[in-house]
């Protein structure tokens, strides 16, 4: 499967950027799972790192691989976080993240990191954000109907993310996720601001100006984009 090979190439290169003694943020999603597997292999060979995960699922995978885990009480800053993305905008390296449901912890961990390295397959590169994916937005469950209305009135056309059983998806942080459109009447930054200032919104999946490097895997190698 060429997409799998591309993800694997990106993940392995990203994991190779980790140096002994580093404090590392571990991302969420299928590409990050390949990164964590590679990090686990290197830890088994003697690499010394401490890590903080961006989701319970990534935490469980890392612990199963005996990757030493820490927390922000003991480790307030990280040297690098390696994560995936749903969309990477060519040129700006702005990201849409969150389709793995982990955007809140991903953004908190990314903000505590000196460097953010994103590993993707080529399908994630877009010219305009929102062209392939809608934007995930994390919402407080209490009064979600009122937040839904506020976001609708702002043109975001929110849709509740549901589980197979027909109940709302619940994040690690015990919140809901709305999938939103990006109204063209505002700039990307304008939409990010409007979301952040909407009561009931916890966080959104626009990671603007946060990625330092993006590694794009392909079946015959990798390409690295620098911010
Ligand atoms: O939720 C996220 O931002 C994750 O990084 C995820 O969406 C990336 O997806 P992947 O499974 O294609 O790596």
Image: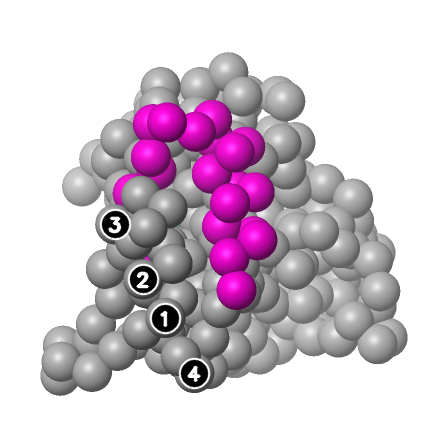
Name the residue that disc number 2 marks: 149
Is residue 22 shown left or right of residue 25? right
Q: Nearer the viewer, mark 1 or mark 4?
A: 1
Q: Is mark 1 within 8 Å of ligand 1?
A: no
The C terminus lies in quadrant:
top right
Q: Residue at 65%, 60% (x, y): give it.
A: 108
Q: Picture coordinates of residue 148 (x, y %)?
A: 32, 64
Binning the other alpha carbons within 10 Å of mark 1 as few (below 14), some (14 to 19) or many (20 upward) gives: few
Q: Secondary structure at mark 2?
A: helix
Name the residue that disc number 4 marks: 142
Q: Is mark 4 within 8 Å of ligand 1?
A: no
Position of residue 115 relative to residue 67, above or below, is: above
Binning the other alpha carbons within 10 Å of mark 2 as few (below 14), some (14 to 19) or many (20 upward) gives: some
Q: Residue at 43%, 83% (x, y): give it.
A: 142
Q: Picture coordinates of residue 160 (x, y %)?
A: 25, 66
Dot placed on the residue nearer the N-terminal end, 4 or 2: 4
Quote the CA–CA distance across marks 2 and 3.
9 Å
Look at the numbered discs 4 and 2 and tell me whether their residues touch, using CB distance below 8 Å: no
Name the residue that disc number 1 marks: 146
Q: Residue at 64%, 71% (x, y): give it.
A: 67
Look at the numbered discs 1 and 2 and tell me whether their residues touch, using CB distance below 8 Å: yes
User: Residue 157: which numbered mark, if any?
Assistant: 3
Dot placed on the residue nearer the N-terminal end, 3 or 4: 4
Binning the other alpha carbons within 10 Å of mark 3 as few (below 14), some (14 to 19) or many (20 upward) gives: some
Magenta region: 177-199
Its colouring scheme is one colour
């Amino acid at each position: 499967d060429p997409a799998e090979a591309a993800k694997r190439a990106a993940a392995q290169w990203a994991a190779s950027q980790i140096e002994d003694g580093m404090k590392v943020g571990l991302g969420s999603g299928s590409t990050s799972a390949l990164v964590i597997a590679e990090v686990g292999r290197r830890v088994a060979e003697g690499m010394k790192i401490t890590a903080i995960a961006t989701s319970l699922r990534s935490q469980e995978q890392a612990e199963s691989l005996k990757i030493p885990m820490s927390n922000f009480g003991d480790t307030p800053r990280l040297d690098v976080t390696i994560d995936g993305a749903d969309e990477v905008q060519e040129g700006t390296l702005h990201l849409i993240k969150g389709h793995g449901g982990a955007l809140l912890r991903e953004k908190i961990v990314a903000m505590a990191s000196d460097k953010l390295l994103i590993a993707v397959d080529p399908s994630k590169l877009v010219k305009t954000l929102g062209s392939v994916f809608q934007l995930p937005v994390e919402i407080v469950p209490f009064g979600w109907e009122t937040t839904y209305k506020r976001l609708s009135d702002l043109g975001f056309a929110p849709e509740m993310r549901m589980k197979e059983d027909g109940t709302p998806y619940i994040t690690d942080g015990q919140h809901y996720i709305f999938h939103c459109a990006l109204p063209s009447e505002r700039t990307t930054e304008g939409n990010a601001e409007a979301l952040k200032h909407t009561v009931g919104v916890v966080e959104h999946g626009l990671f603007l100006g946060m990625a330092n490097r993006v590694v794009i895997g392909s079946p015959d190698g990798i390409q690295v984009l620098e911010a």
